[in-house]
Image: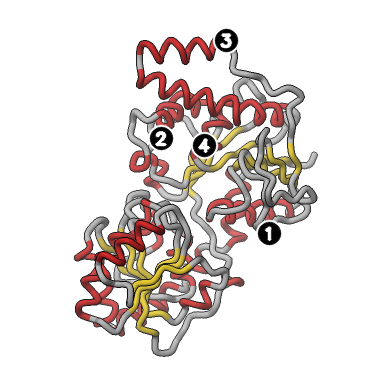
Amino acid sequence: MNKEIIIVLHTLAVGGAERRLSTVANYMASKGISVTMLLIDNPVVKFEVDPRVKVVCVNQNPKLDEYDADRCELFKLDKNPGVSFIDKTKIYVTKKTSPKKNSFINREIFLKYNYAVPLREYIKNHPEATVISFMTIPNISMMIAVKDLPNRALFGDCIDVKTEYPPDSPYSLMRKKYFTRANGAIFQTPDEKDYYTFLPQLEKFIIPNFVKSENLPERYTGERRKEIVNFCRLSAAKDLPLLIEAFSIFYGEYPDYNLSIYGEGPLKKDLLKIIDEKNLNNCVHIYDFDIKIHEKIRDAAMFVSSSYREGISNSMVEALAIGMPCVCTDCAGGGARMMIEDHENGLLVPVKNPQALYEGMKEVIENPELAEKMSKNAVKIKERLKPETICNQMIEAILGEK
């Protein structure tokens, strides 16, 4: 009988995790596994997805501006249930008696009726499928949905939960309430796994990101340009103000260098304001993300990551794979220390410390022999994180097979 896997996630339009999962799904399909990517938000497909992979959006009111009906199906309920009398009562009572509990109930009910109900109806029609979700909202919604269903169910976390969510947040409380239903879980790092001590019987797997080396340029061997680069989502976790602060110190000593940040995200205006306030407009630039980013930056002086929390950063791993000297913060989540051996294939520095980040950048410039050694060692990560190896580990974990 054909093996069947359902992957639950937000969208296939944006996101590093979503891009990786499309590759995993493609590999599964090539091995004869029936794969469905079940989207809870956006029905737009922008990543390369094998025609053998079925894509379905369960959002009952999706935005259809860029919807491609040939690539993504819309799953519609015969009747979209309204909020039950019992749940309405919970909202009313907790609003009167406990604002904190009311916050939890409101969030729980929102996820239940907007995501879990249509997910459950779809999964019920595939009782022999193994279901795995990724990211916080899909994970919680899917675990609500699979109550009493026969499916093997797993979740995937690629964040450091204890850093991202306080213990009393609705999402932390819902993890403890619903994740007991899981048969297994996949993490990128030991730090991520260690959060789930309250699930001692859960089958836990640590599987890092892969690197698609065939899409990356070879290591640059000439004289490097006087440019420091980062490419990432412009979000709080990346702590780009720290990078700008560290570069401002660096620039005082090395005024012939530039800092280029490639990416898009909610903090772009704030970052531009910081650059302006520090009078760095002539040497610090924010550019839109470029699909050919690796070719653009391969001859730059170094890649610098300033994140204060991160699983395994795609940009860090890709920078290592093309042989860039890398300076990365040893951030919560543990991805950097999992991939970087300090002073061998990169430099690790403390988080939230602009002086330490500056000193790491300076060390790369002042010690070209070290920079070259790290560059040569960095590209070895391509062998360690081959897509076929990582995808086979994912299949074994998801299906519970050795």
Q: Secondary structure at mark 4?
A: helix
Query: Looking at the image, is mark 2 or mark 1 earlier in the sequence?
Result: 1
Mark identifier at residue 137: 4
Residue assigned mark 2: 196
Q: Are marks 2 and 4 in contact (CB under 8 Å)?
A: no
Q: CA distance from mark 2 to mark 1?
A: 33 Å
User: What amino acid type should be assigned to the residue bearing mark 4?
Assistant: Ile
User: What amino acid type should be assigned to the residue bearing mark 1?
Assistant: Glu
Name the foreground residue: 284 vs 249.
284
Residue assigned mark 3: 85
Q: Are marks 2 and 3 in contact (CB under 8 Å)?
A: no
Name the foreground residue: 270 vs 159.
270
Q: CA distance from mark 2 to mark 4?
A: 17 Å
In the picture, measured across the screen, residue 202 lies left or right of residue 372, that is: right
Mark identifier at residue 11: none
In the picture, measured across the screen, residue 107 lies left or right of residue 162, that is: right
Q: Secondary structure at mark 2?
A: loop
Q: Are marks 2 and 1 in contact (CB under 8 Å)?
A: no
| Crowd around label 1: few <14 · some 14–19 · many ≥20 (10 Å) | few
The residue positioned 63% from the left and 50% from the top of the image is 12
Q: Secondary structure at mark 1?
A: loop
